[in-house]
Amino acid sequence: MFFIFLNFKMAIHKTKAIVLETKDYRETSYLLKLFTFDFGKINAQAKGARRKIGKFGTNFLLMSYNEIVFYENNVSDLHIISQADMLQHFGNIGGCLEKFTYAAYFLELVNTVMLVGEKNKEIFVLLLQFLNFLDAGCGLEQIRYIFEIKFLKISGFKPYFDCCVSCGENIAEKSKFSYVFGGLLCKNCFGKDFAAQHIMEGTIASVNYIEQMDLSKFNNFKITLSIRKQLEQILGSFIGFYLGRKFKSLSFLSEIRGSYV
């Protein structure tokens, strides 16, 4: 009888990572979904992290920002974390239900759209910036819409607000937003989607501005209440339509707002 031993050499990588999702595994470990700067979204296991206090320099809190070292698994997509140190845990987010719910939504959106192994450093930086905005309590009334617009643009899912999505003509007069076509329809193309929704010029201008806006201007930029309401309806419906799902965090956010009334 012959035994063949296969020697799989596992590459070792070091990178920064944001915890998107964490689950208890057996009695001692965690199964994690991490969004990393260098490798995009990865699945990883932190063996013994729940049993041995101090084995890792982090407890892998949801949304925490860490530096990790992991062994790349050549057989499956579940990699093994060997070292980890927490860089930031965003303590002010955890102490506020509204902030935490927004953060959970951002993580949920990134986790849903980004595929395992899909690298996107811009989205990593964007997510980290908005977690810092939330931690500092900046612009809570409009932070969701700015994140959605920026994220949709970078990820390639953005709706078309520059011209008519059907005929390509510039929008000179009134327009409607079509979820089916994924953008604006000019007056001549209204008949192509009778379910299209009227959209204000201010909403169009806000989306186009936010797409190009430097985030250093975040604190100085304000969106009016009427435009925020329309952005909530249009962006929320657009994301739900194209991703084919409802986000638990947004449903919970609506419940929170209802309790304030």
Image (tube, rainbow, N blue to C red):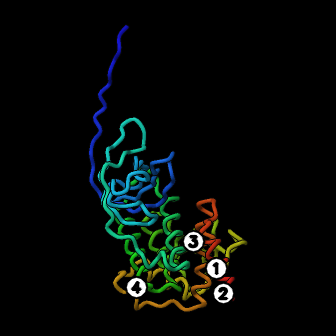
User: Depth-wise, is mark 2 or mark 3 nearer the camera?
Assistant: 2
- Seen in the image, is 46 located left or right of residue 188? left
Badge 3 is on which residue?
183
- The CA distance from mark 4 to mark 1 is 25 Å
Badge 4 is on which residue?
218
Which one is in front, 56 or 229? Answer: 56
x 53%, y 82%: residue: 204
Asked if residue 58 can be seen in this view, the reply is: yes
Confirm or deny contact between disc 2 and disc 1 (CB under 8 A): yes
- Seen in the image, is 55 located left or right of residue 185? left
* Quarter of the image with the N terminus in it: top left
Q: Position of residue 90 (x, y in %)?
A: 40, 74
Asked which secondary structure carries label 1, the reply is: helix
Q: Mark 1 belongs to which amino acid?
A: Ile
- Seen in the image, is 198 located left or right of residue 113? right
Q: Mark 4 belongs to which amino acid?
A: Phe
Give the mark nearer the N terminus: 4 vs 1: 4
Give the mark nearer the N terminus: 2 vs 3: 3
x 33%, y 43%: residue: 72
- The CA distance from mark 3 to mark 1 is 30 Å
x 44%, y 85%: residue: 138
Q: Mark 3 belongs to which amino acid?
A: Gly
Corner quadrant of residue 246: bottom right
Confirm or deny contact between disc 4 and disc 1 (CB under 8 A): no
Q: Position of residue 7 (x, y in %)?
A: 29, 28
User: Depth-wise, is mark 4 or mark 1 nearer the camera?
Assistant: 1
Residue 260 tag number: 2
* Quarter of the image with the C terminus in it: bottom right
In the displayed orientation, state which residue is furthest to the right.
194
In the displayed orientation, state which residue is furthest to the top.
1
